[in-house]
Image: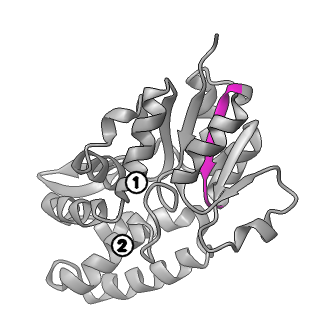
């Protein structure tokens, strides 16, 4: 019998908004706690980029500003932020990953975000080993400073291409996401779950065949019933 797979998004799914996603959190951290490491103009642009990204104004172009702001930042700062982010990943979510792993689900993370802000916090939570692959966009370092980014997942449609390269089939793949970059993959899956902790998305996407959940922990009981 062919096993099921789960593709998880990261920001807003595994990492709840606090109220920022991981990249916005990093920019806010630089603005407020590392003022001496970035120029005034970069702080101004960073604040504007956070606002625009939260409003989904910049779209994919956010990364251009994000990398420009980060360039030259010391690598240890990224580790500091990773440690702070790890505290926001609920222990109950780690328990959920453990349960699905024990049930034989093969799990992946495919994210348009920054790999370092995903993999490092999960390692700190001892949750990274639950996933067969974590595919995102790693920071490129030079002389222990941020120098750029290698892009694996630029936009939502790239997630489908990656899933297909992993030989995953939509009828045997559960997809869990929360935002507009997840829509293509959610629509691709026969079992799409959308995180809607504030109960605002179910009306917006009422025409979609999504199962809306407020927490990842709800998935275990739902899947037990559906896969009987």
Residue 88 location in percent, x, y?
A: 34, 65
Q: Residue 50, labelled with which disc?
A: none
Residue 27 or 40: which is nearer the viewer?
27
Which residue lies at the image location 42% right of the left edge and 32% below the top edge? 133
Distance in Å between CA atoms under marks 2 and 1: 22 Å
Q: In which quadrant is the C terminus drawn?
A: top right
* Residue 177 within the segment the image draws in magenta: yes
Q: In which quadrant is the N terminus drawn?
A: top right
Judge whether 142 appears above or below 106 on screen.
below
Which residue lies at the image location 37% right of the left edge and 59% below the top edge? 90
Q: Residue 25, labelled with which disc?
A: 2
Judge whether 38 appears above or below 67 on screen.
below
Residue 156 location in percent, x, y?
A: 63, 49
Judge whether 65 appears above or below 172 on screen.
below
Which residue lies at the image location 48% right of the left edge and 59% below the top edge? 11
Q: Earlier in the sequence, mark 2 or mark 1?
A: 2
Name the outermost residue toward the top. Answer: 1
Which residue lies at the image location 19% right of the left edge and 82% below the top edge? 33
Q: Nearer the viewer, mark 2 or mark 1?
A: 1
Name the outermost residue toward the right. Answer: 207
Question: In what element is the residue under mark 1?
Answer: helix
* Res. 161 image quadrant: top right
| Label 1 sits on residue | 92
Residue 112 or 103: which is nearer the viewer?
103
* Res. 117 image quadrant: bottom left
Residue 132 seen in the figure: yes
Boundaries of the magenta span? 172-179
In this image, 149 relative to 112: left or right? left
Question: In what element is the residue under mark 2?
Answer: helix
Residue 137 location in percent, x, y?
A: 41, 47
Q: Count of labels shown?
A: 2
Q: Answer few, some or many: residues within 10 Å of disc 1's Cα (few below 14, many 20 plus, some between 14 and 19).
A: few
């Amino acid at each position: 019998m062919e096993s099921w797979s789960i593709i998880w998004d990261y920001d807003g799914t595994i990492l709840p908004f606090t109220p920022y996603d991981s990249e916005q959190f990093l920019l806010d951290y630089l603005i407020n706690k590392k003022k001496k490491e970035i120029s005034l103009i970069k702080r101004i642009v960073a604040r504007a980029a956070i606002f625009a990204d939260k409003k989904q104004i910049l779209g994919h172009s956010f990364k251009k500003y994000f990398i420009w702001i980060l360039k030259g930042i010391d690598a240890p700062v990224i580790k500091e932020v990773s440690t702070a982010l790890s505290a926001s990943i609920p222990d109950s979510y780690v328990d959920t990953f453990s349960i699905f792993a024990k049930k034989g689900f093969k799990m992946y993370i495919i994210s348009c975000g920054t790999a370092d802000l995903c993999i490092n916090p999960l390692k700190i939570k001892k949750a990274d080993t639950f996933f067969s692959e974590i595919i995102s966009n790693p920071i490129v370092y030079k002389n222990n400073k941020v120098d750029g980014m290698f892009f694996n997942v630029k936009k939502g449609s790239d997630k489908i291409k990656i899933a297909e390269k992993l030989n995953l089939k939509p009828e045997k793949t559960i997809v869990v996401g929360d935002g507009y970059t997840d829509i293509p993959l959610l629509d691709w899956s026969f079992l799409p779950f959308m995180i809607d902790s504030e109960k605002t998305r179910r009306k917006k996407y009422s025409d979609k065949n999504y199962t809306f959940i407020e927490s990842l922990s709800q998935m275990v009981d739902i899947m037990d019933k559906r896969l009987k």
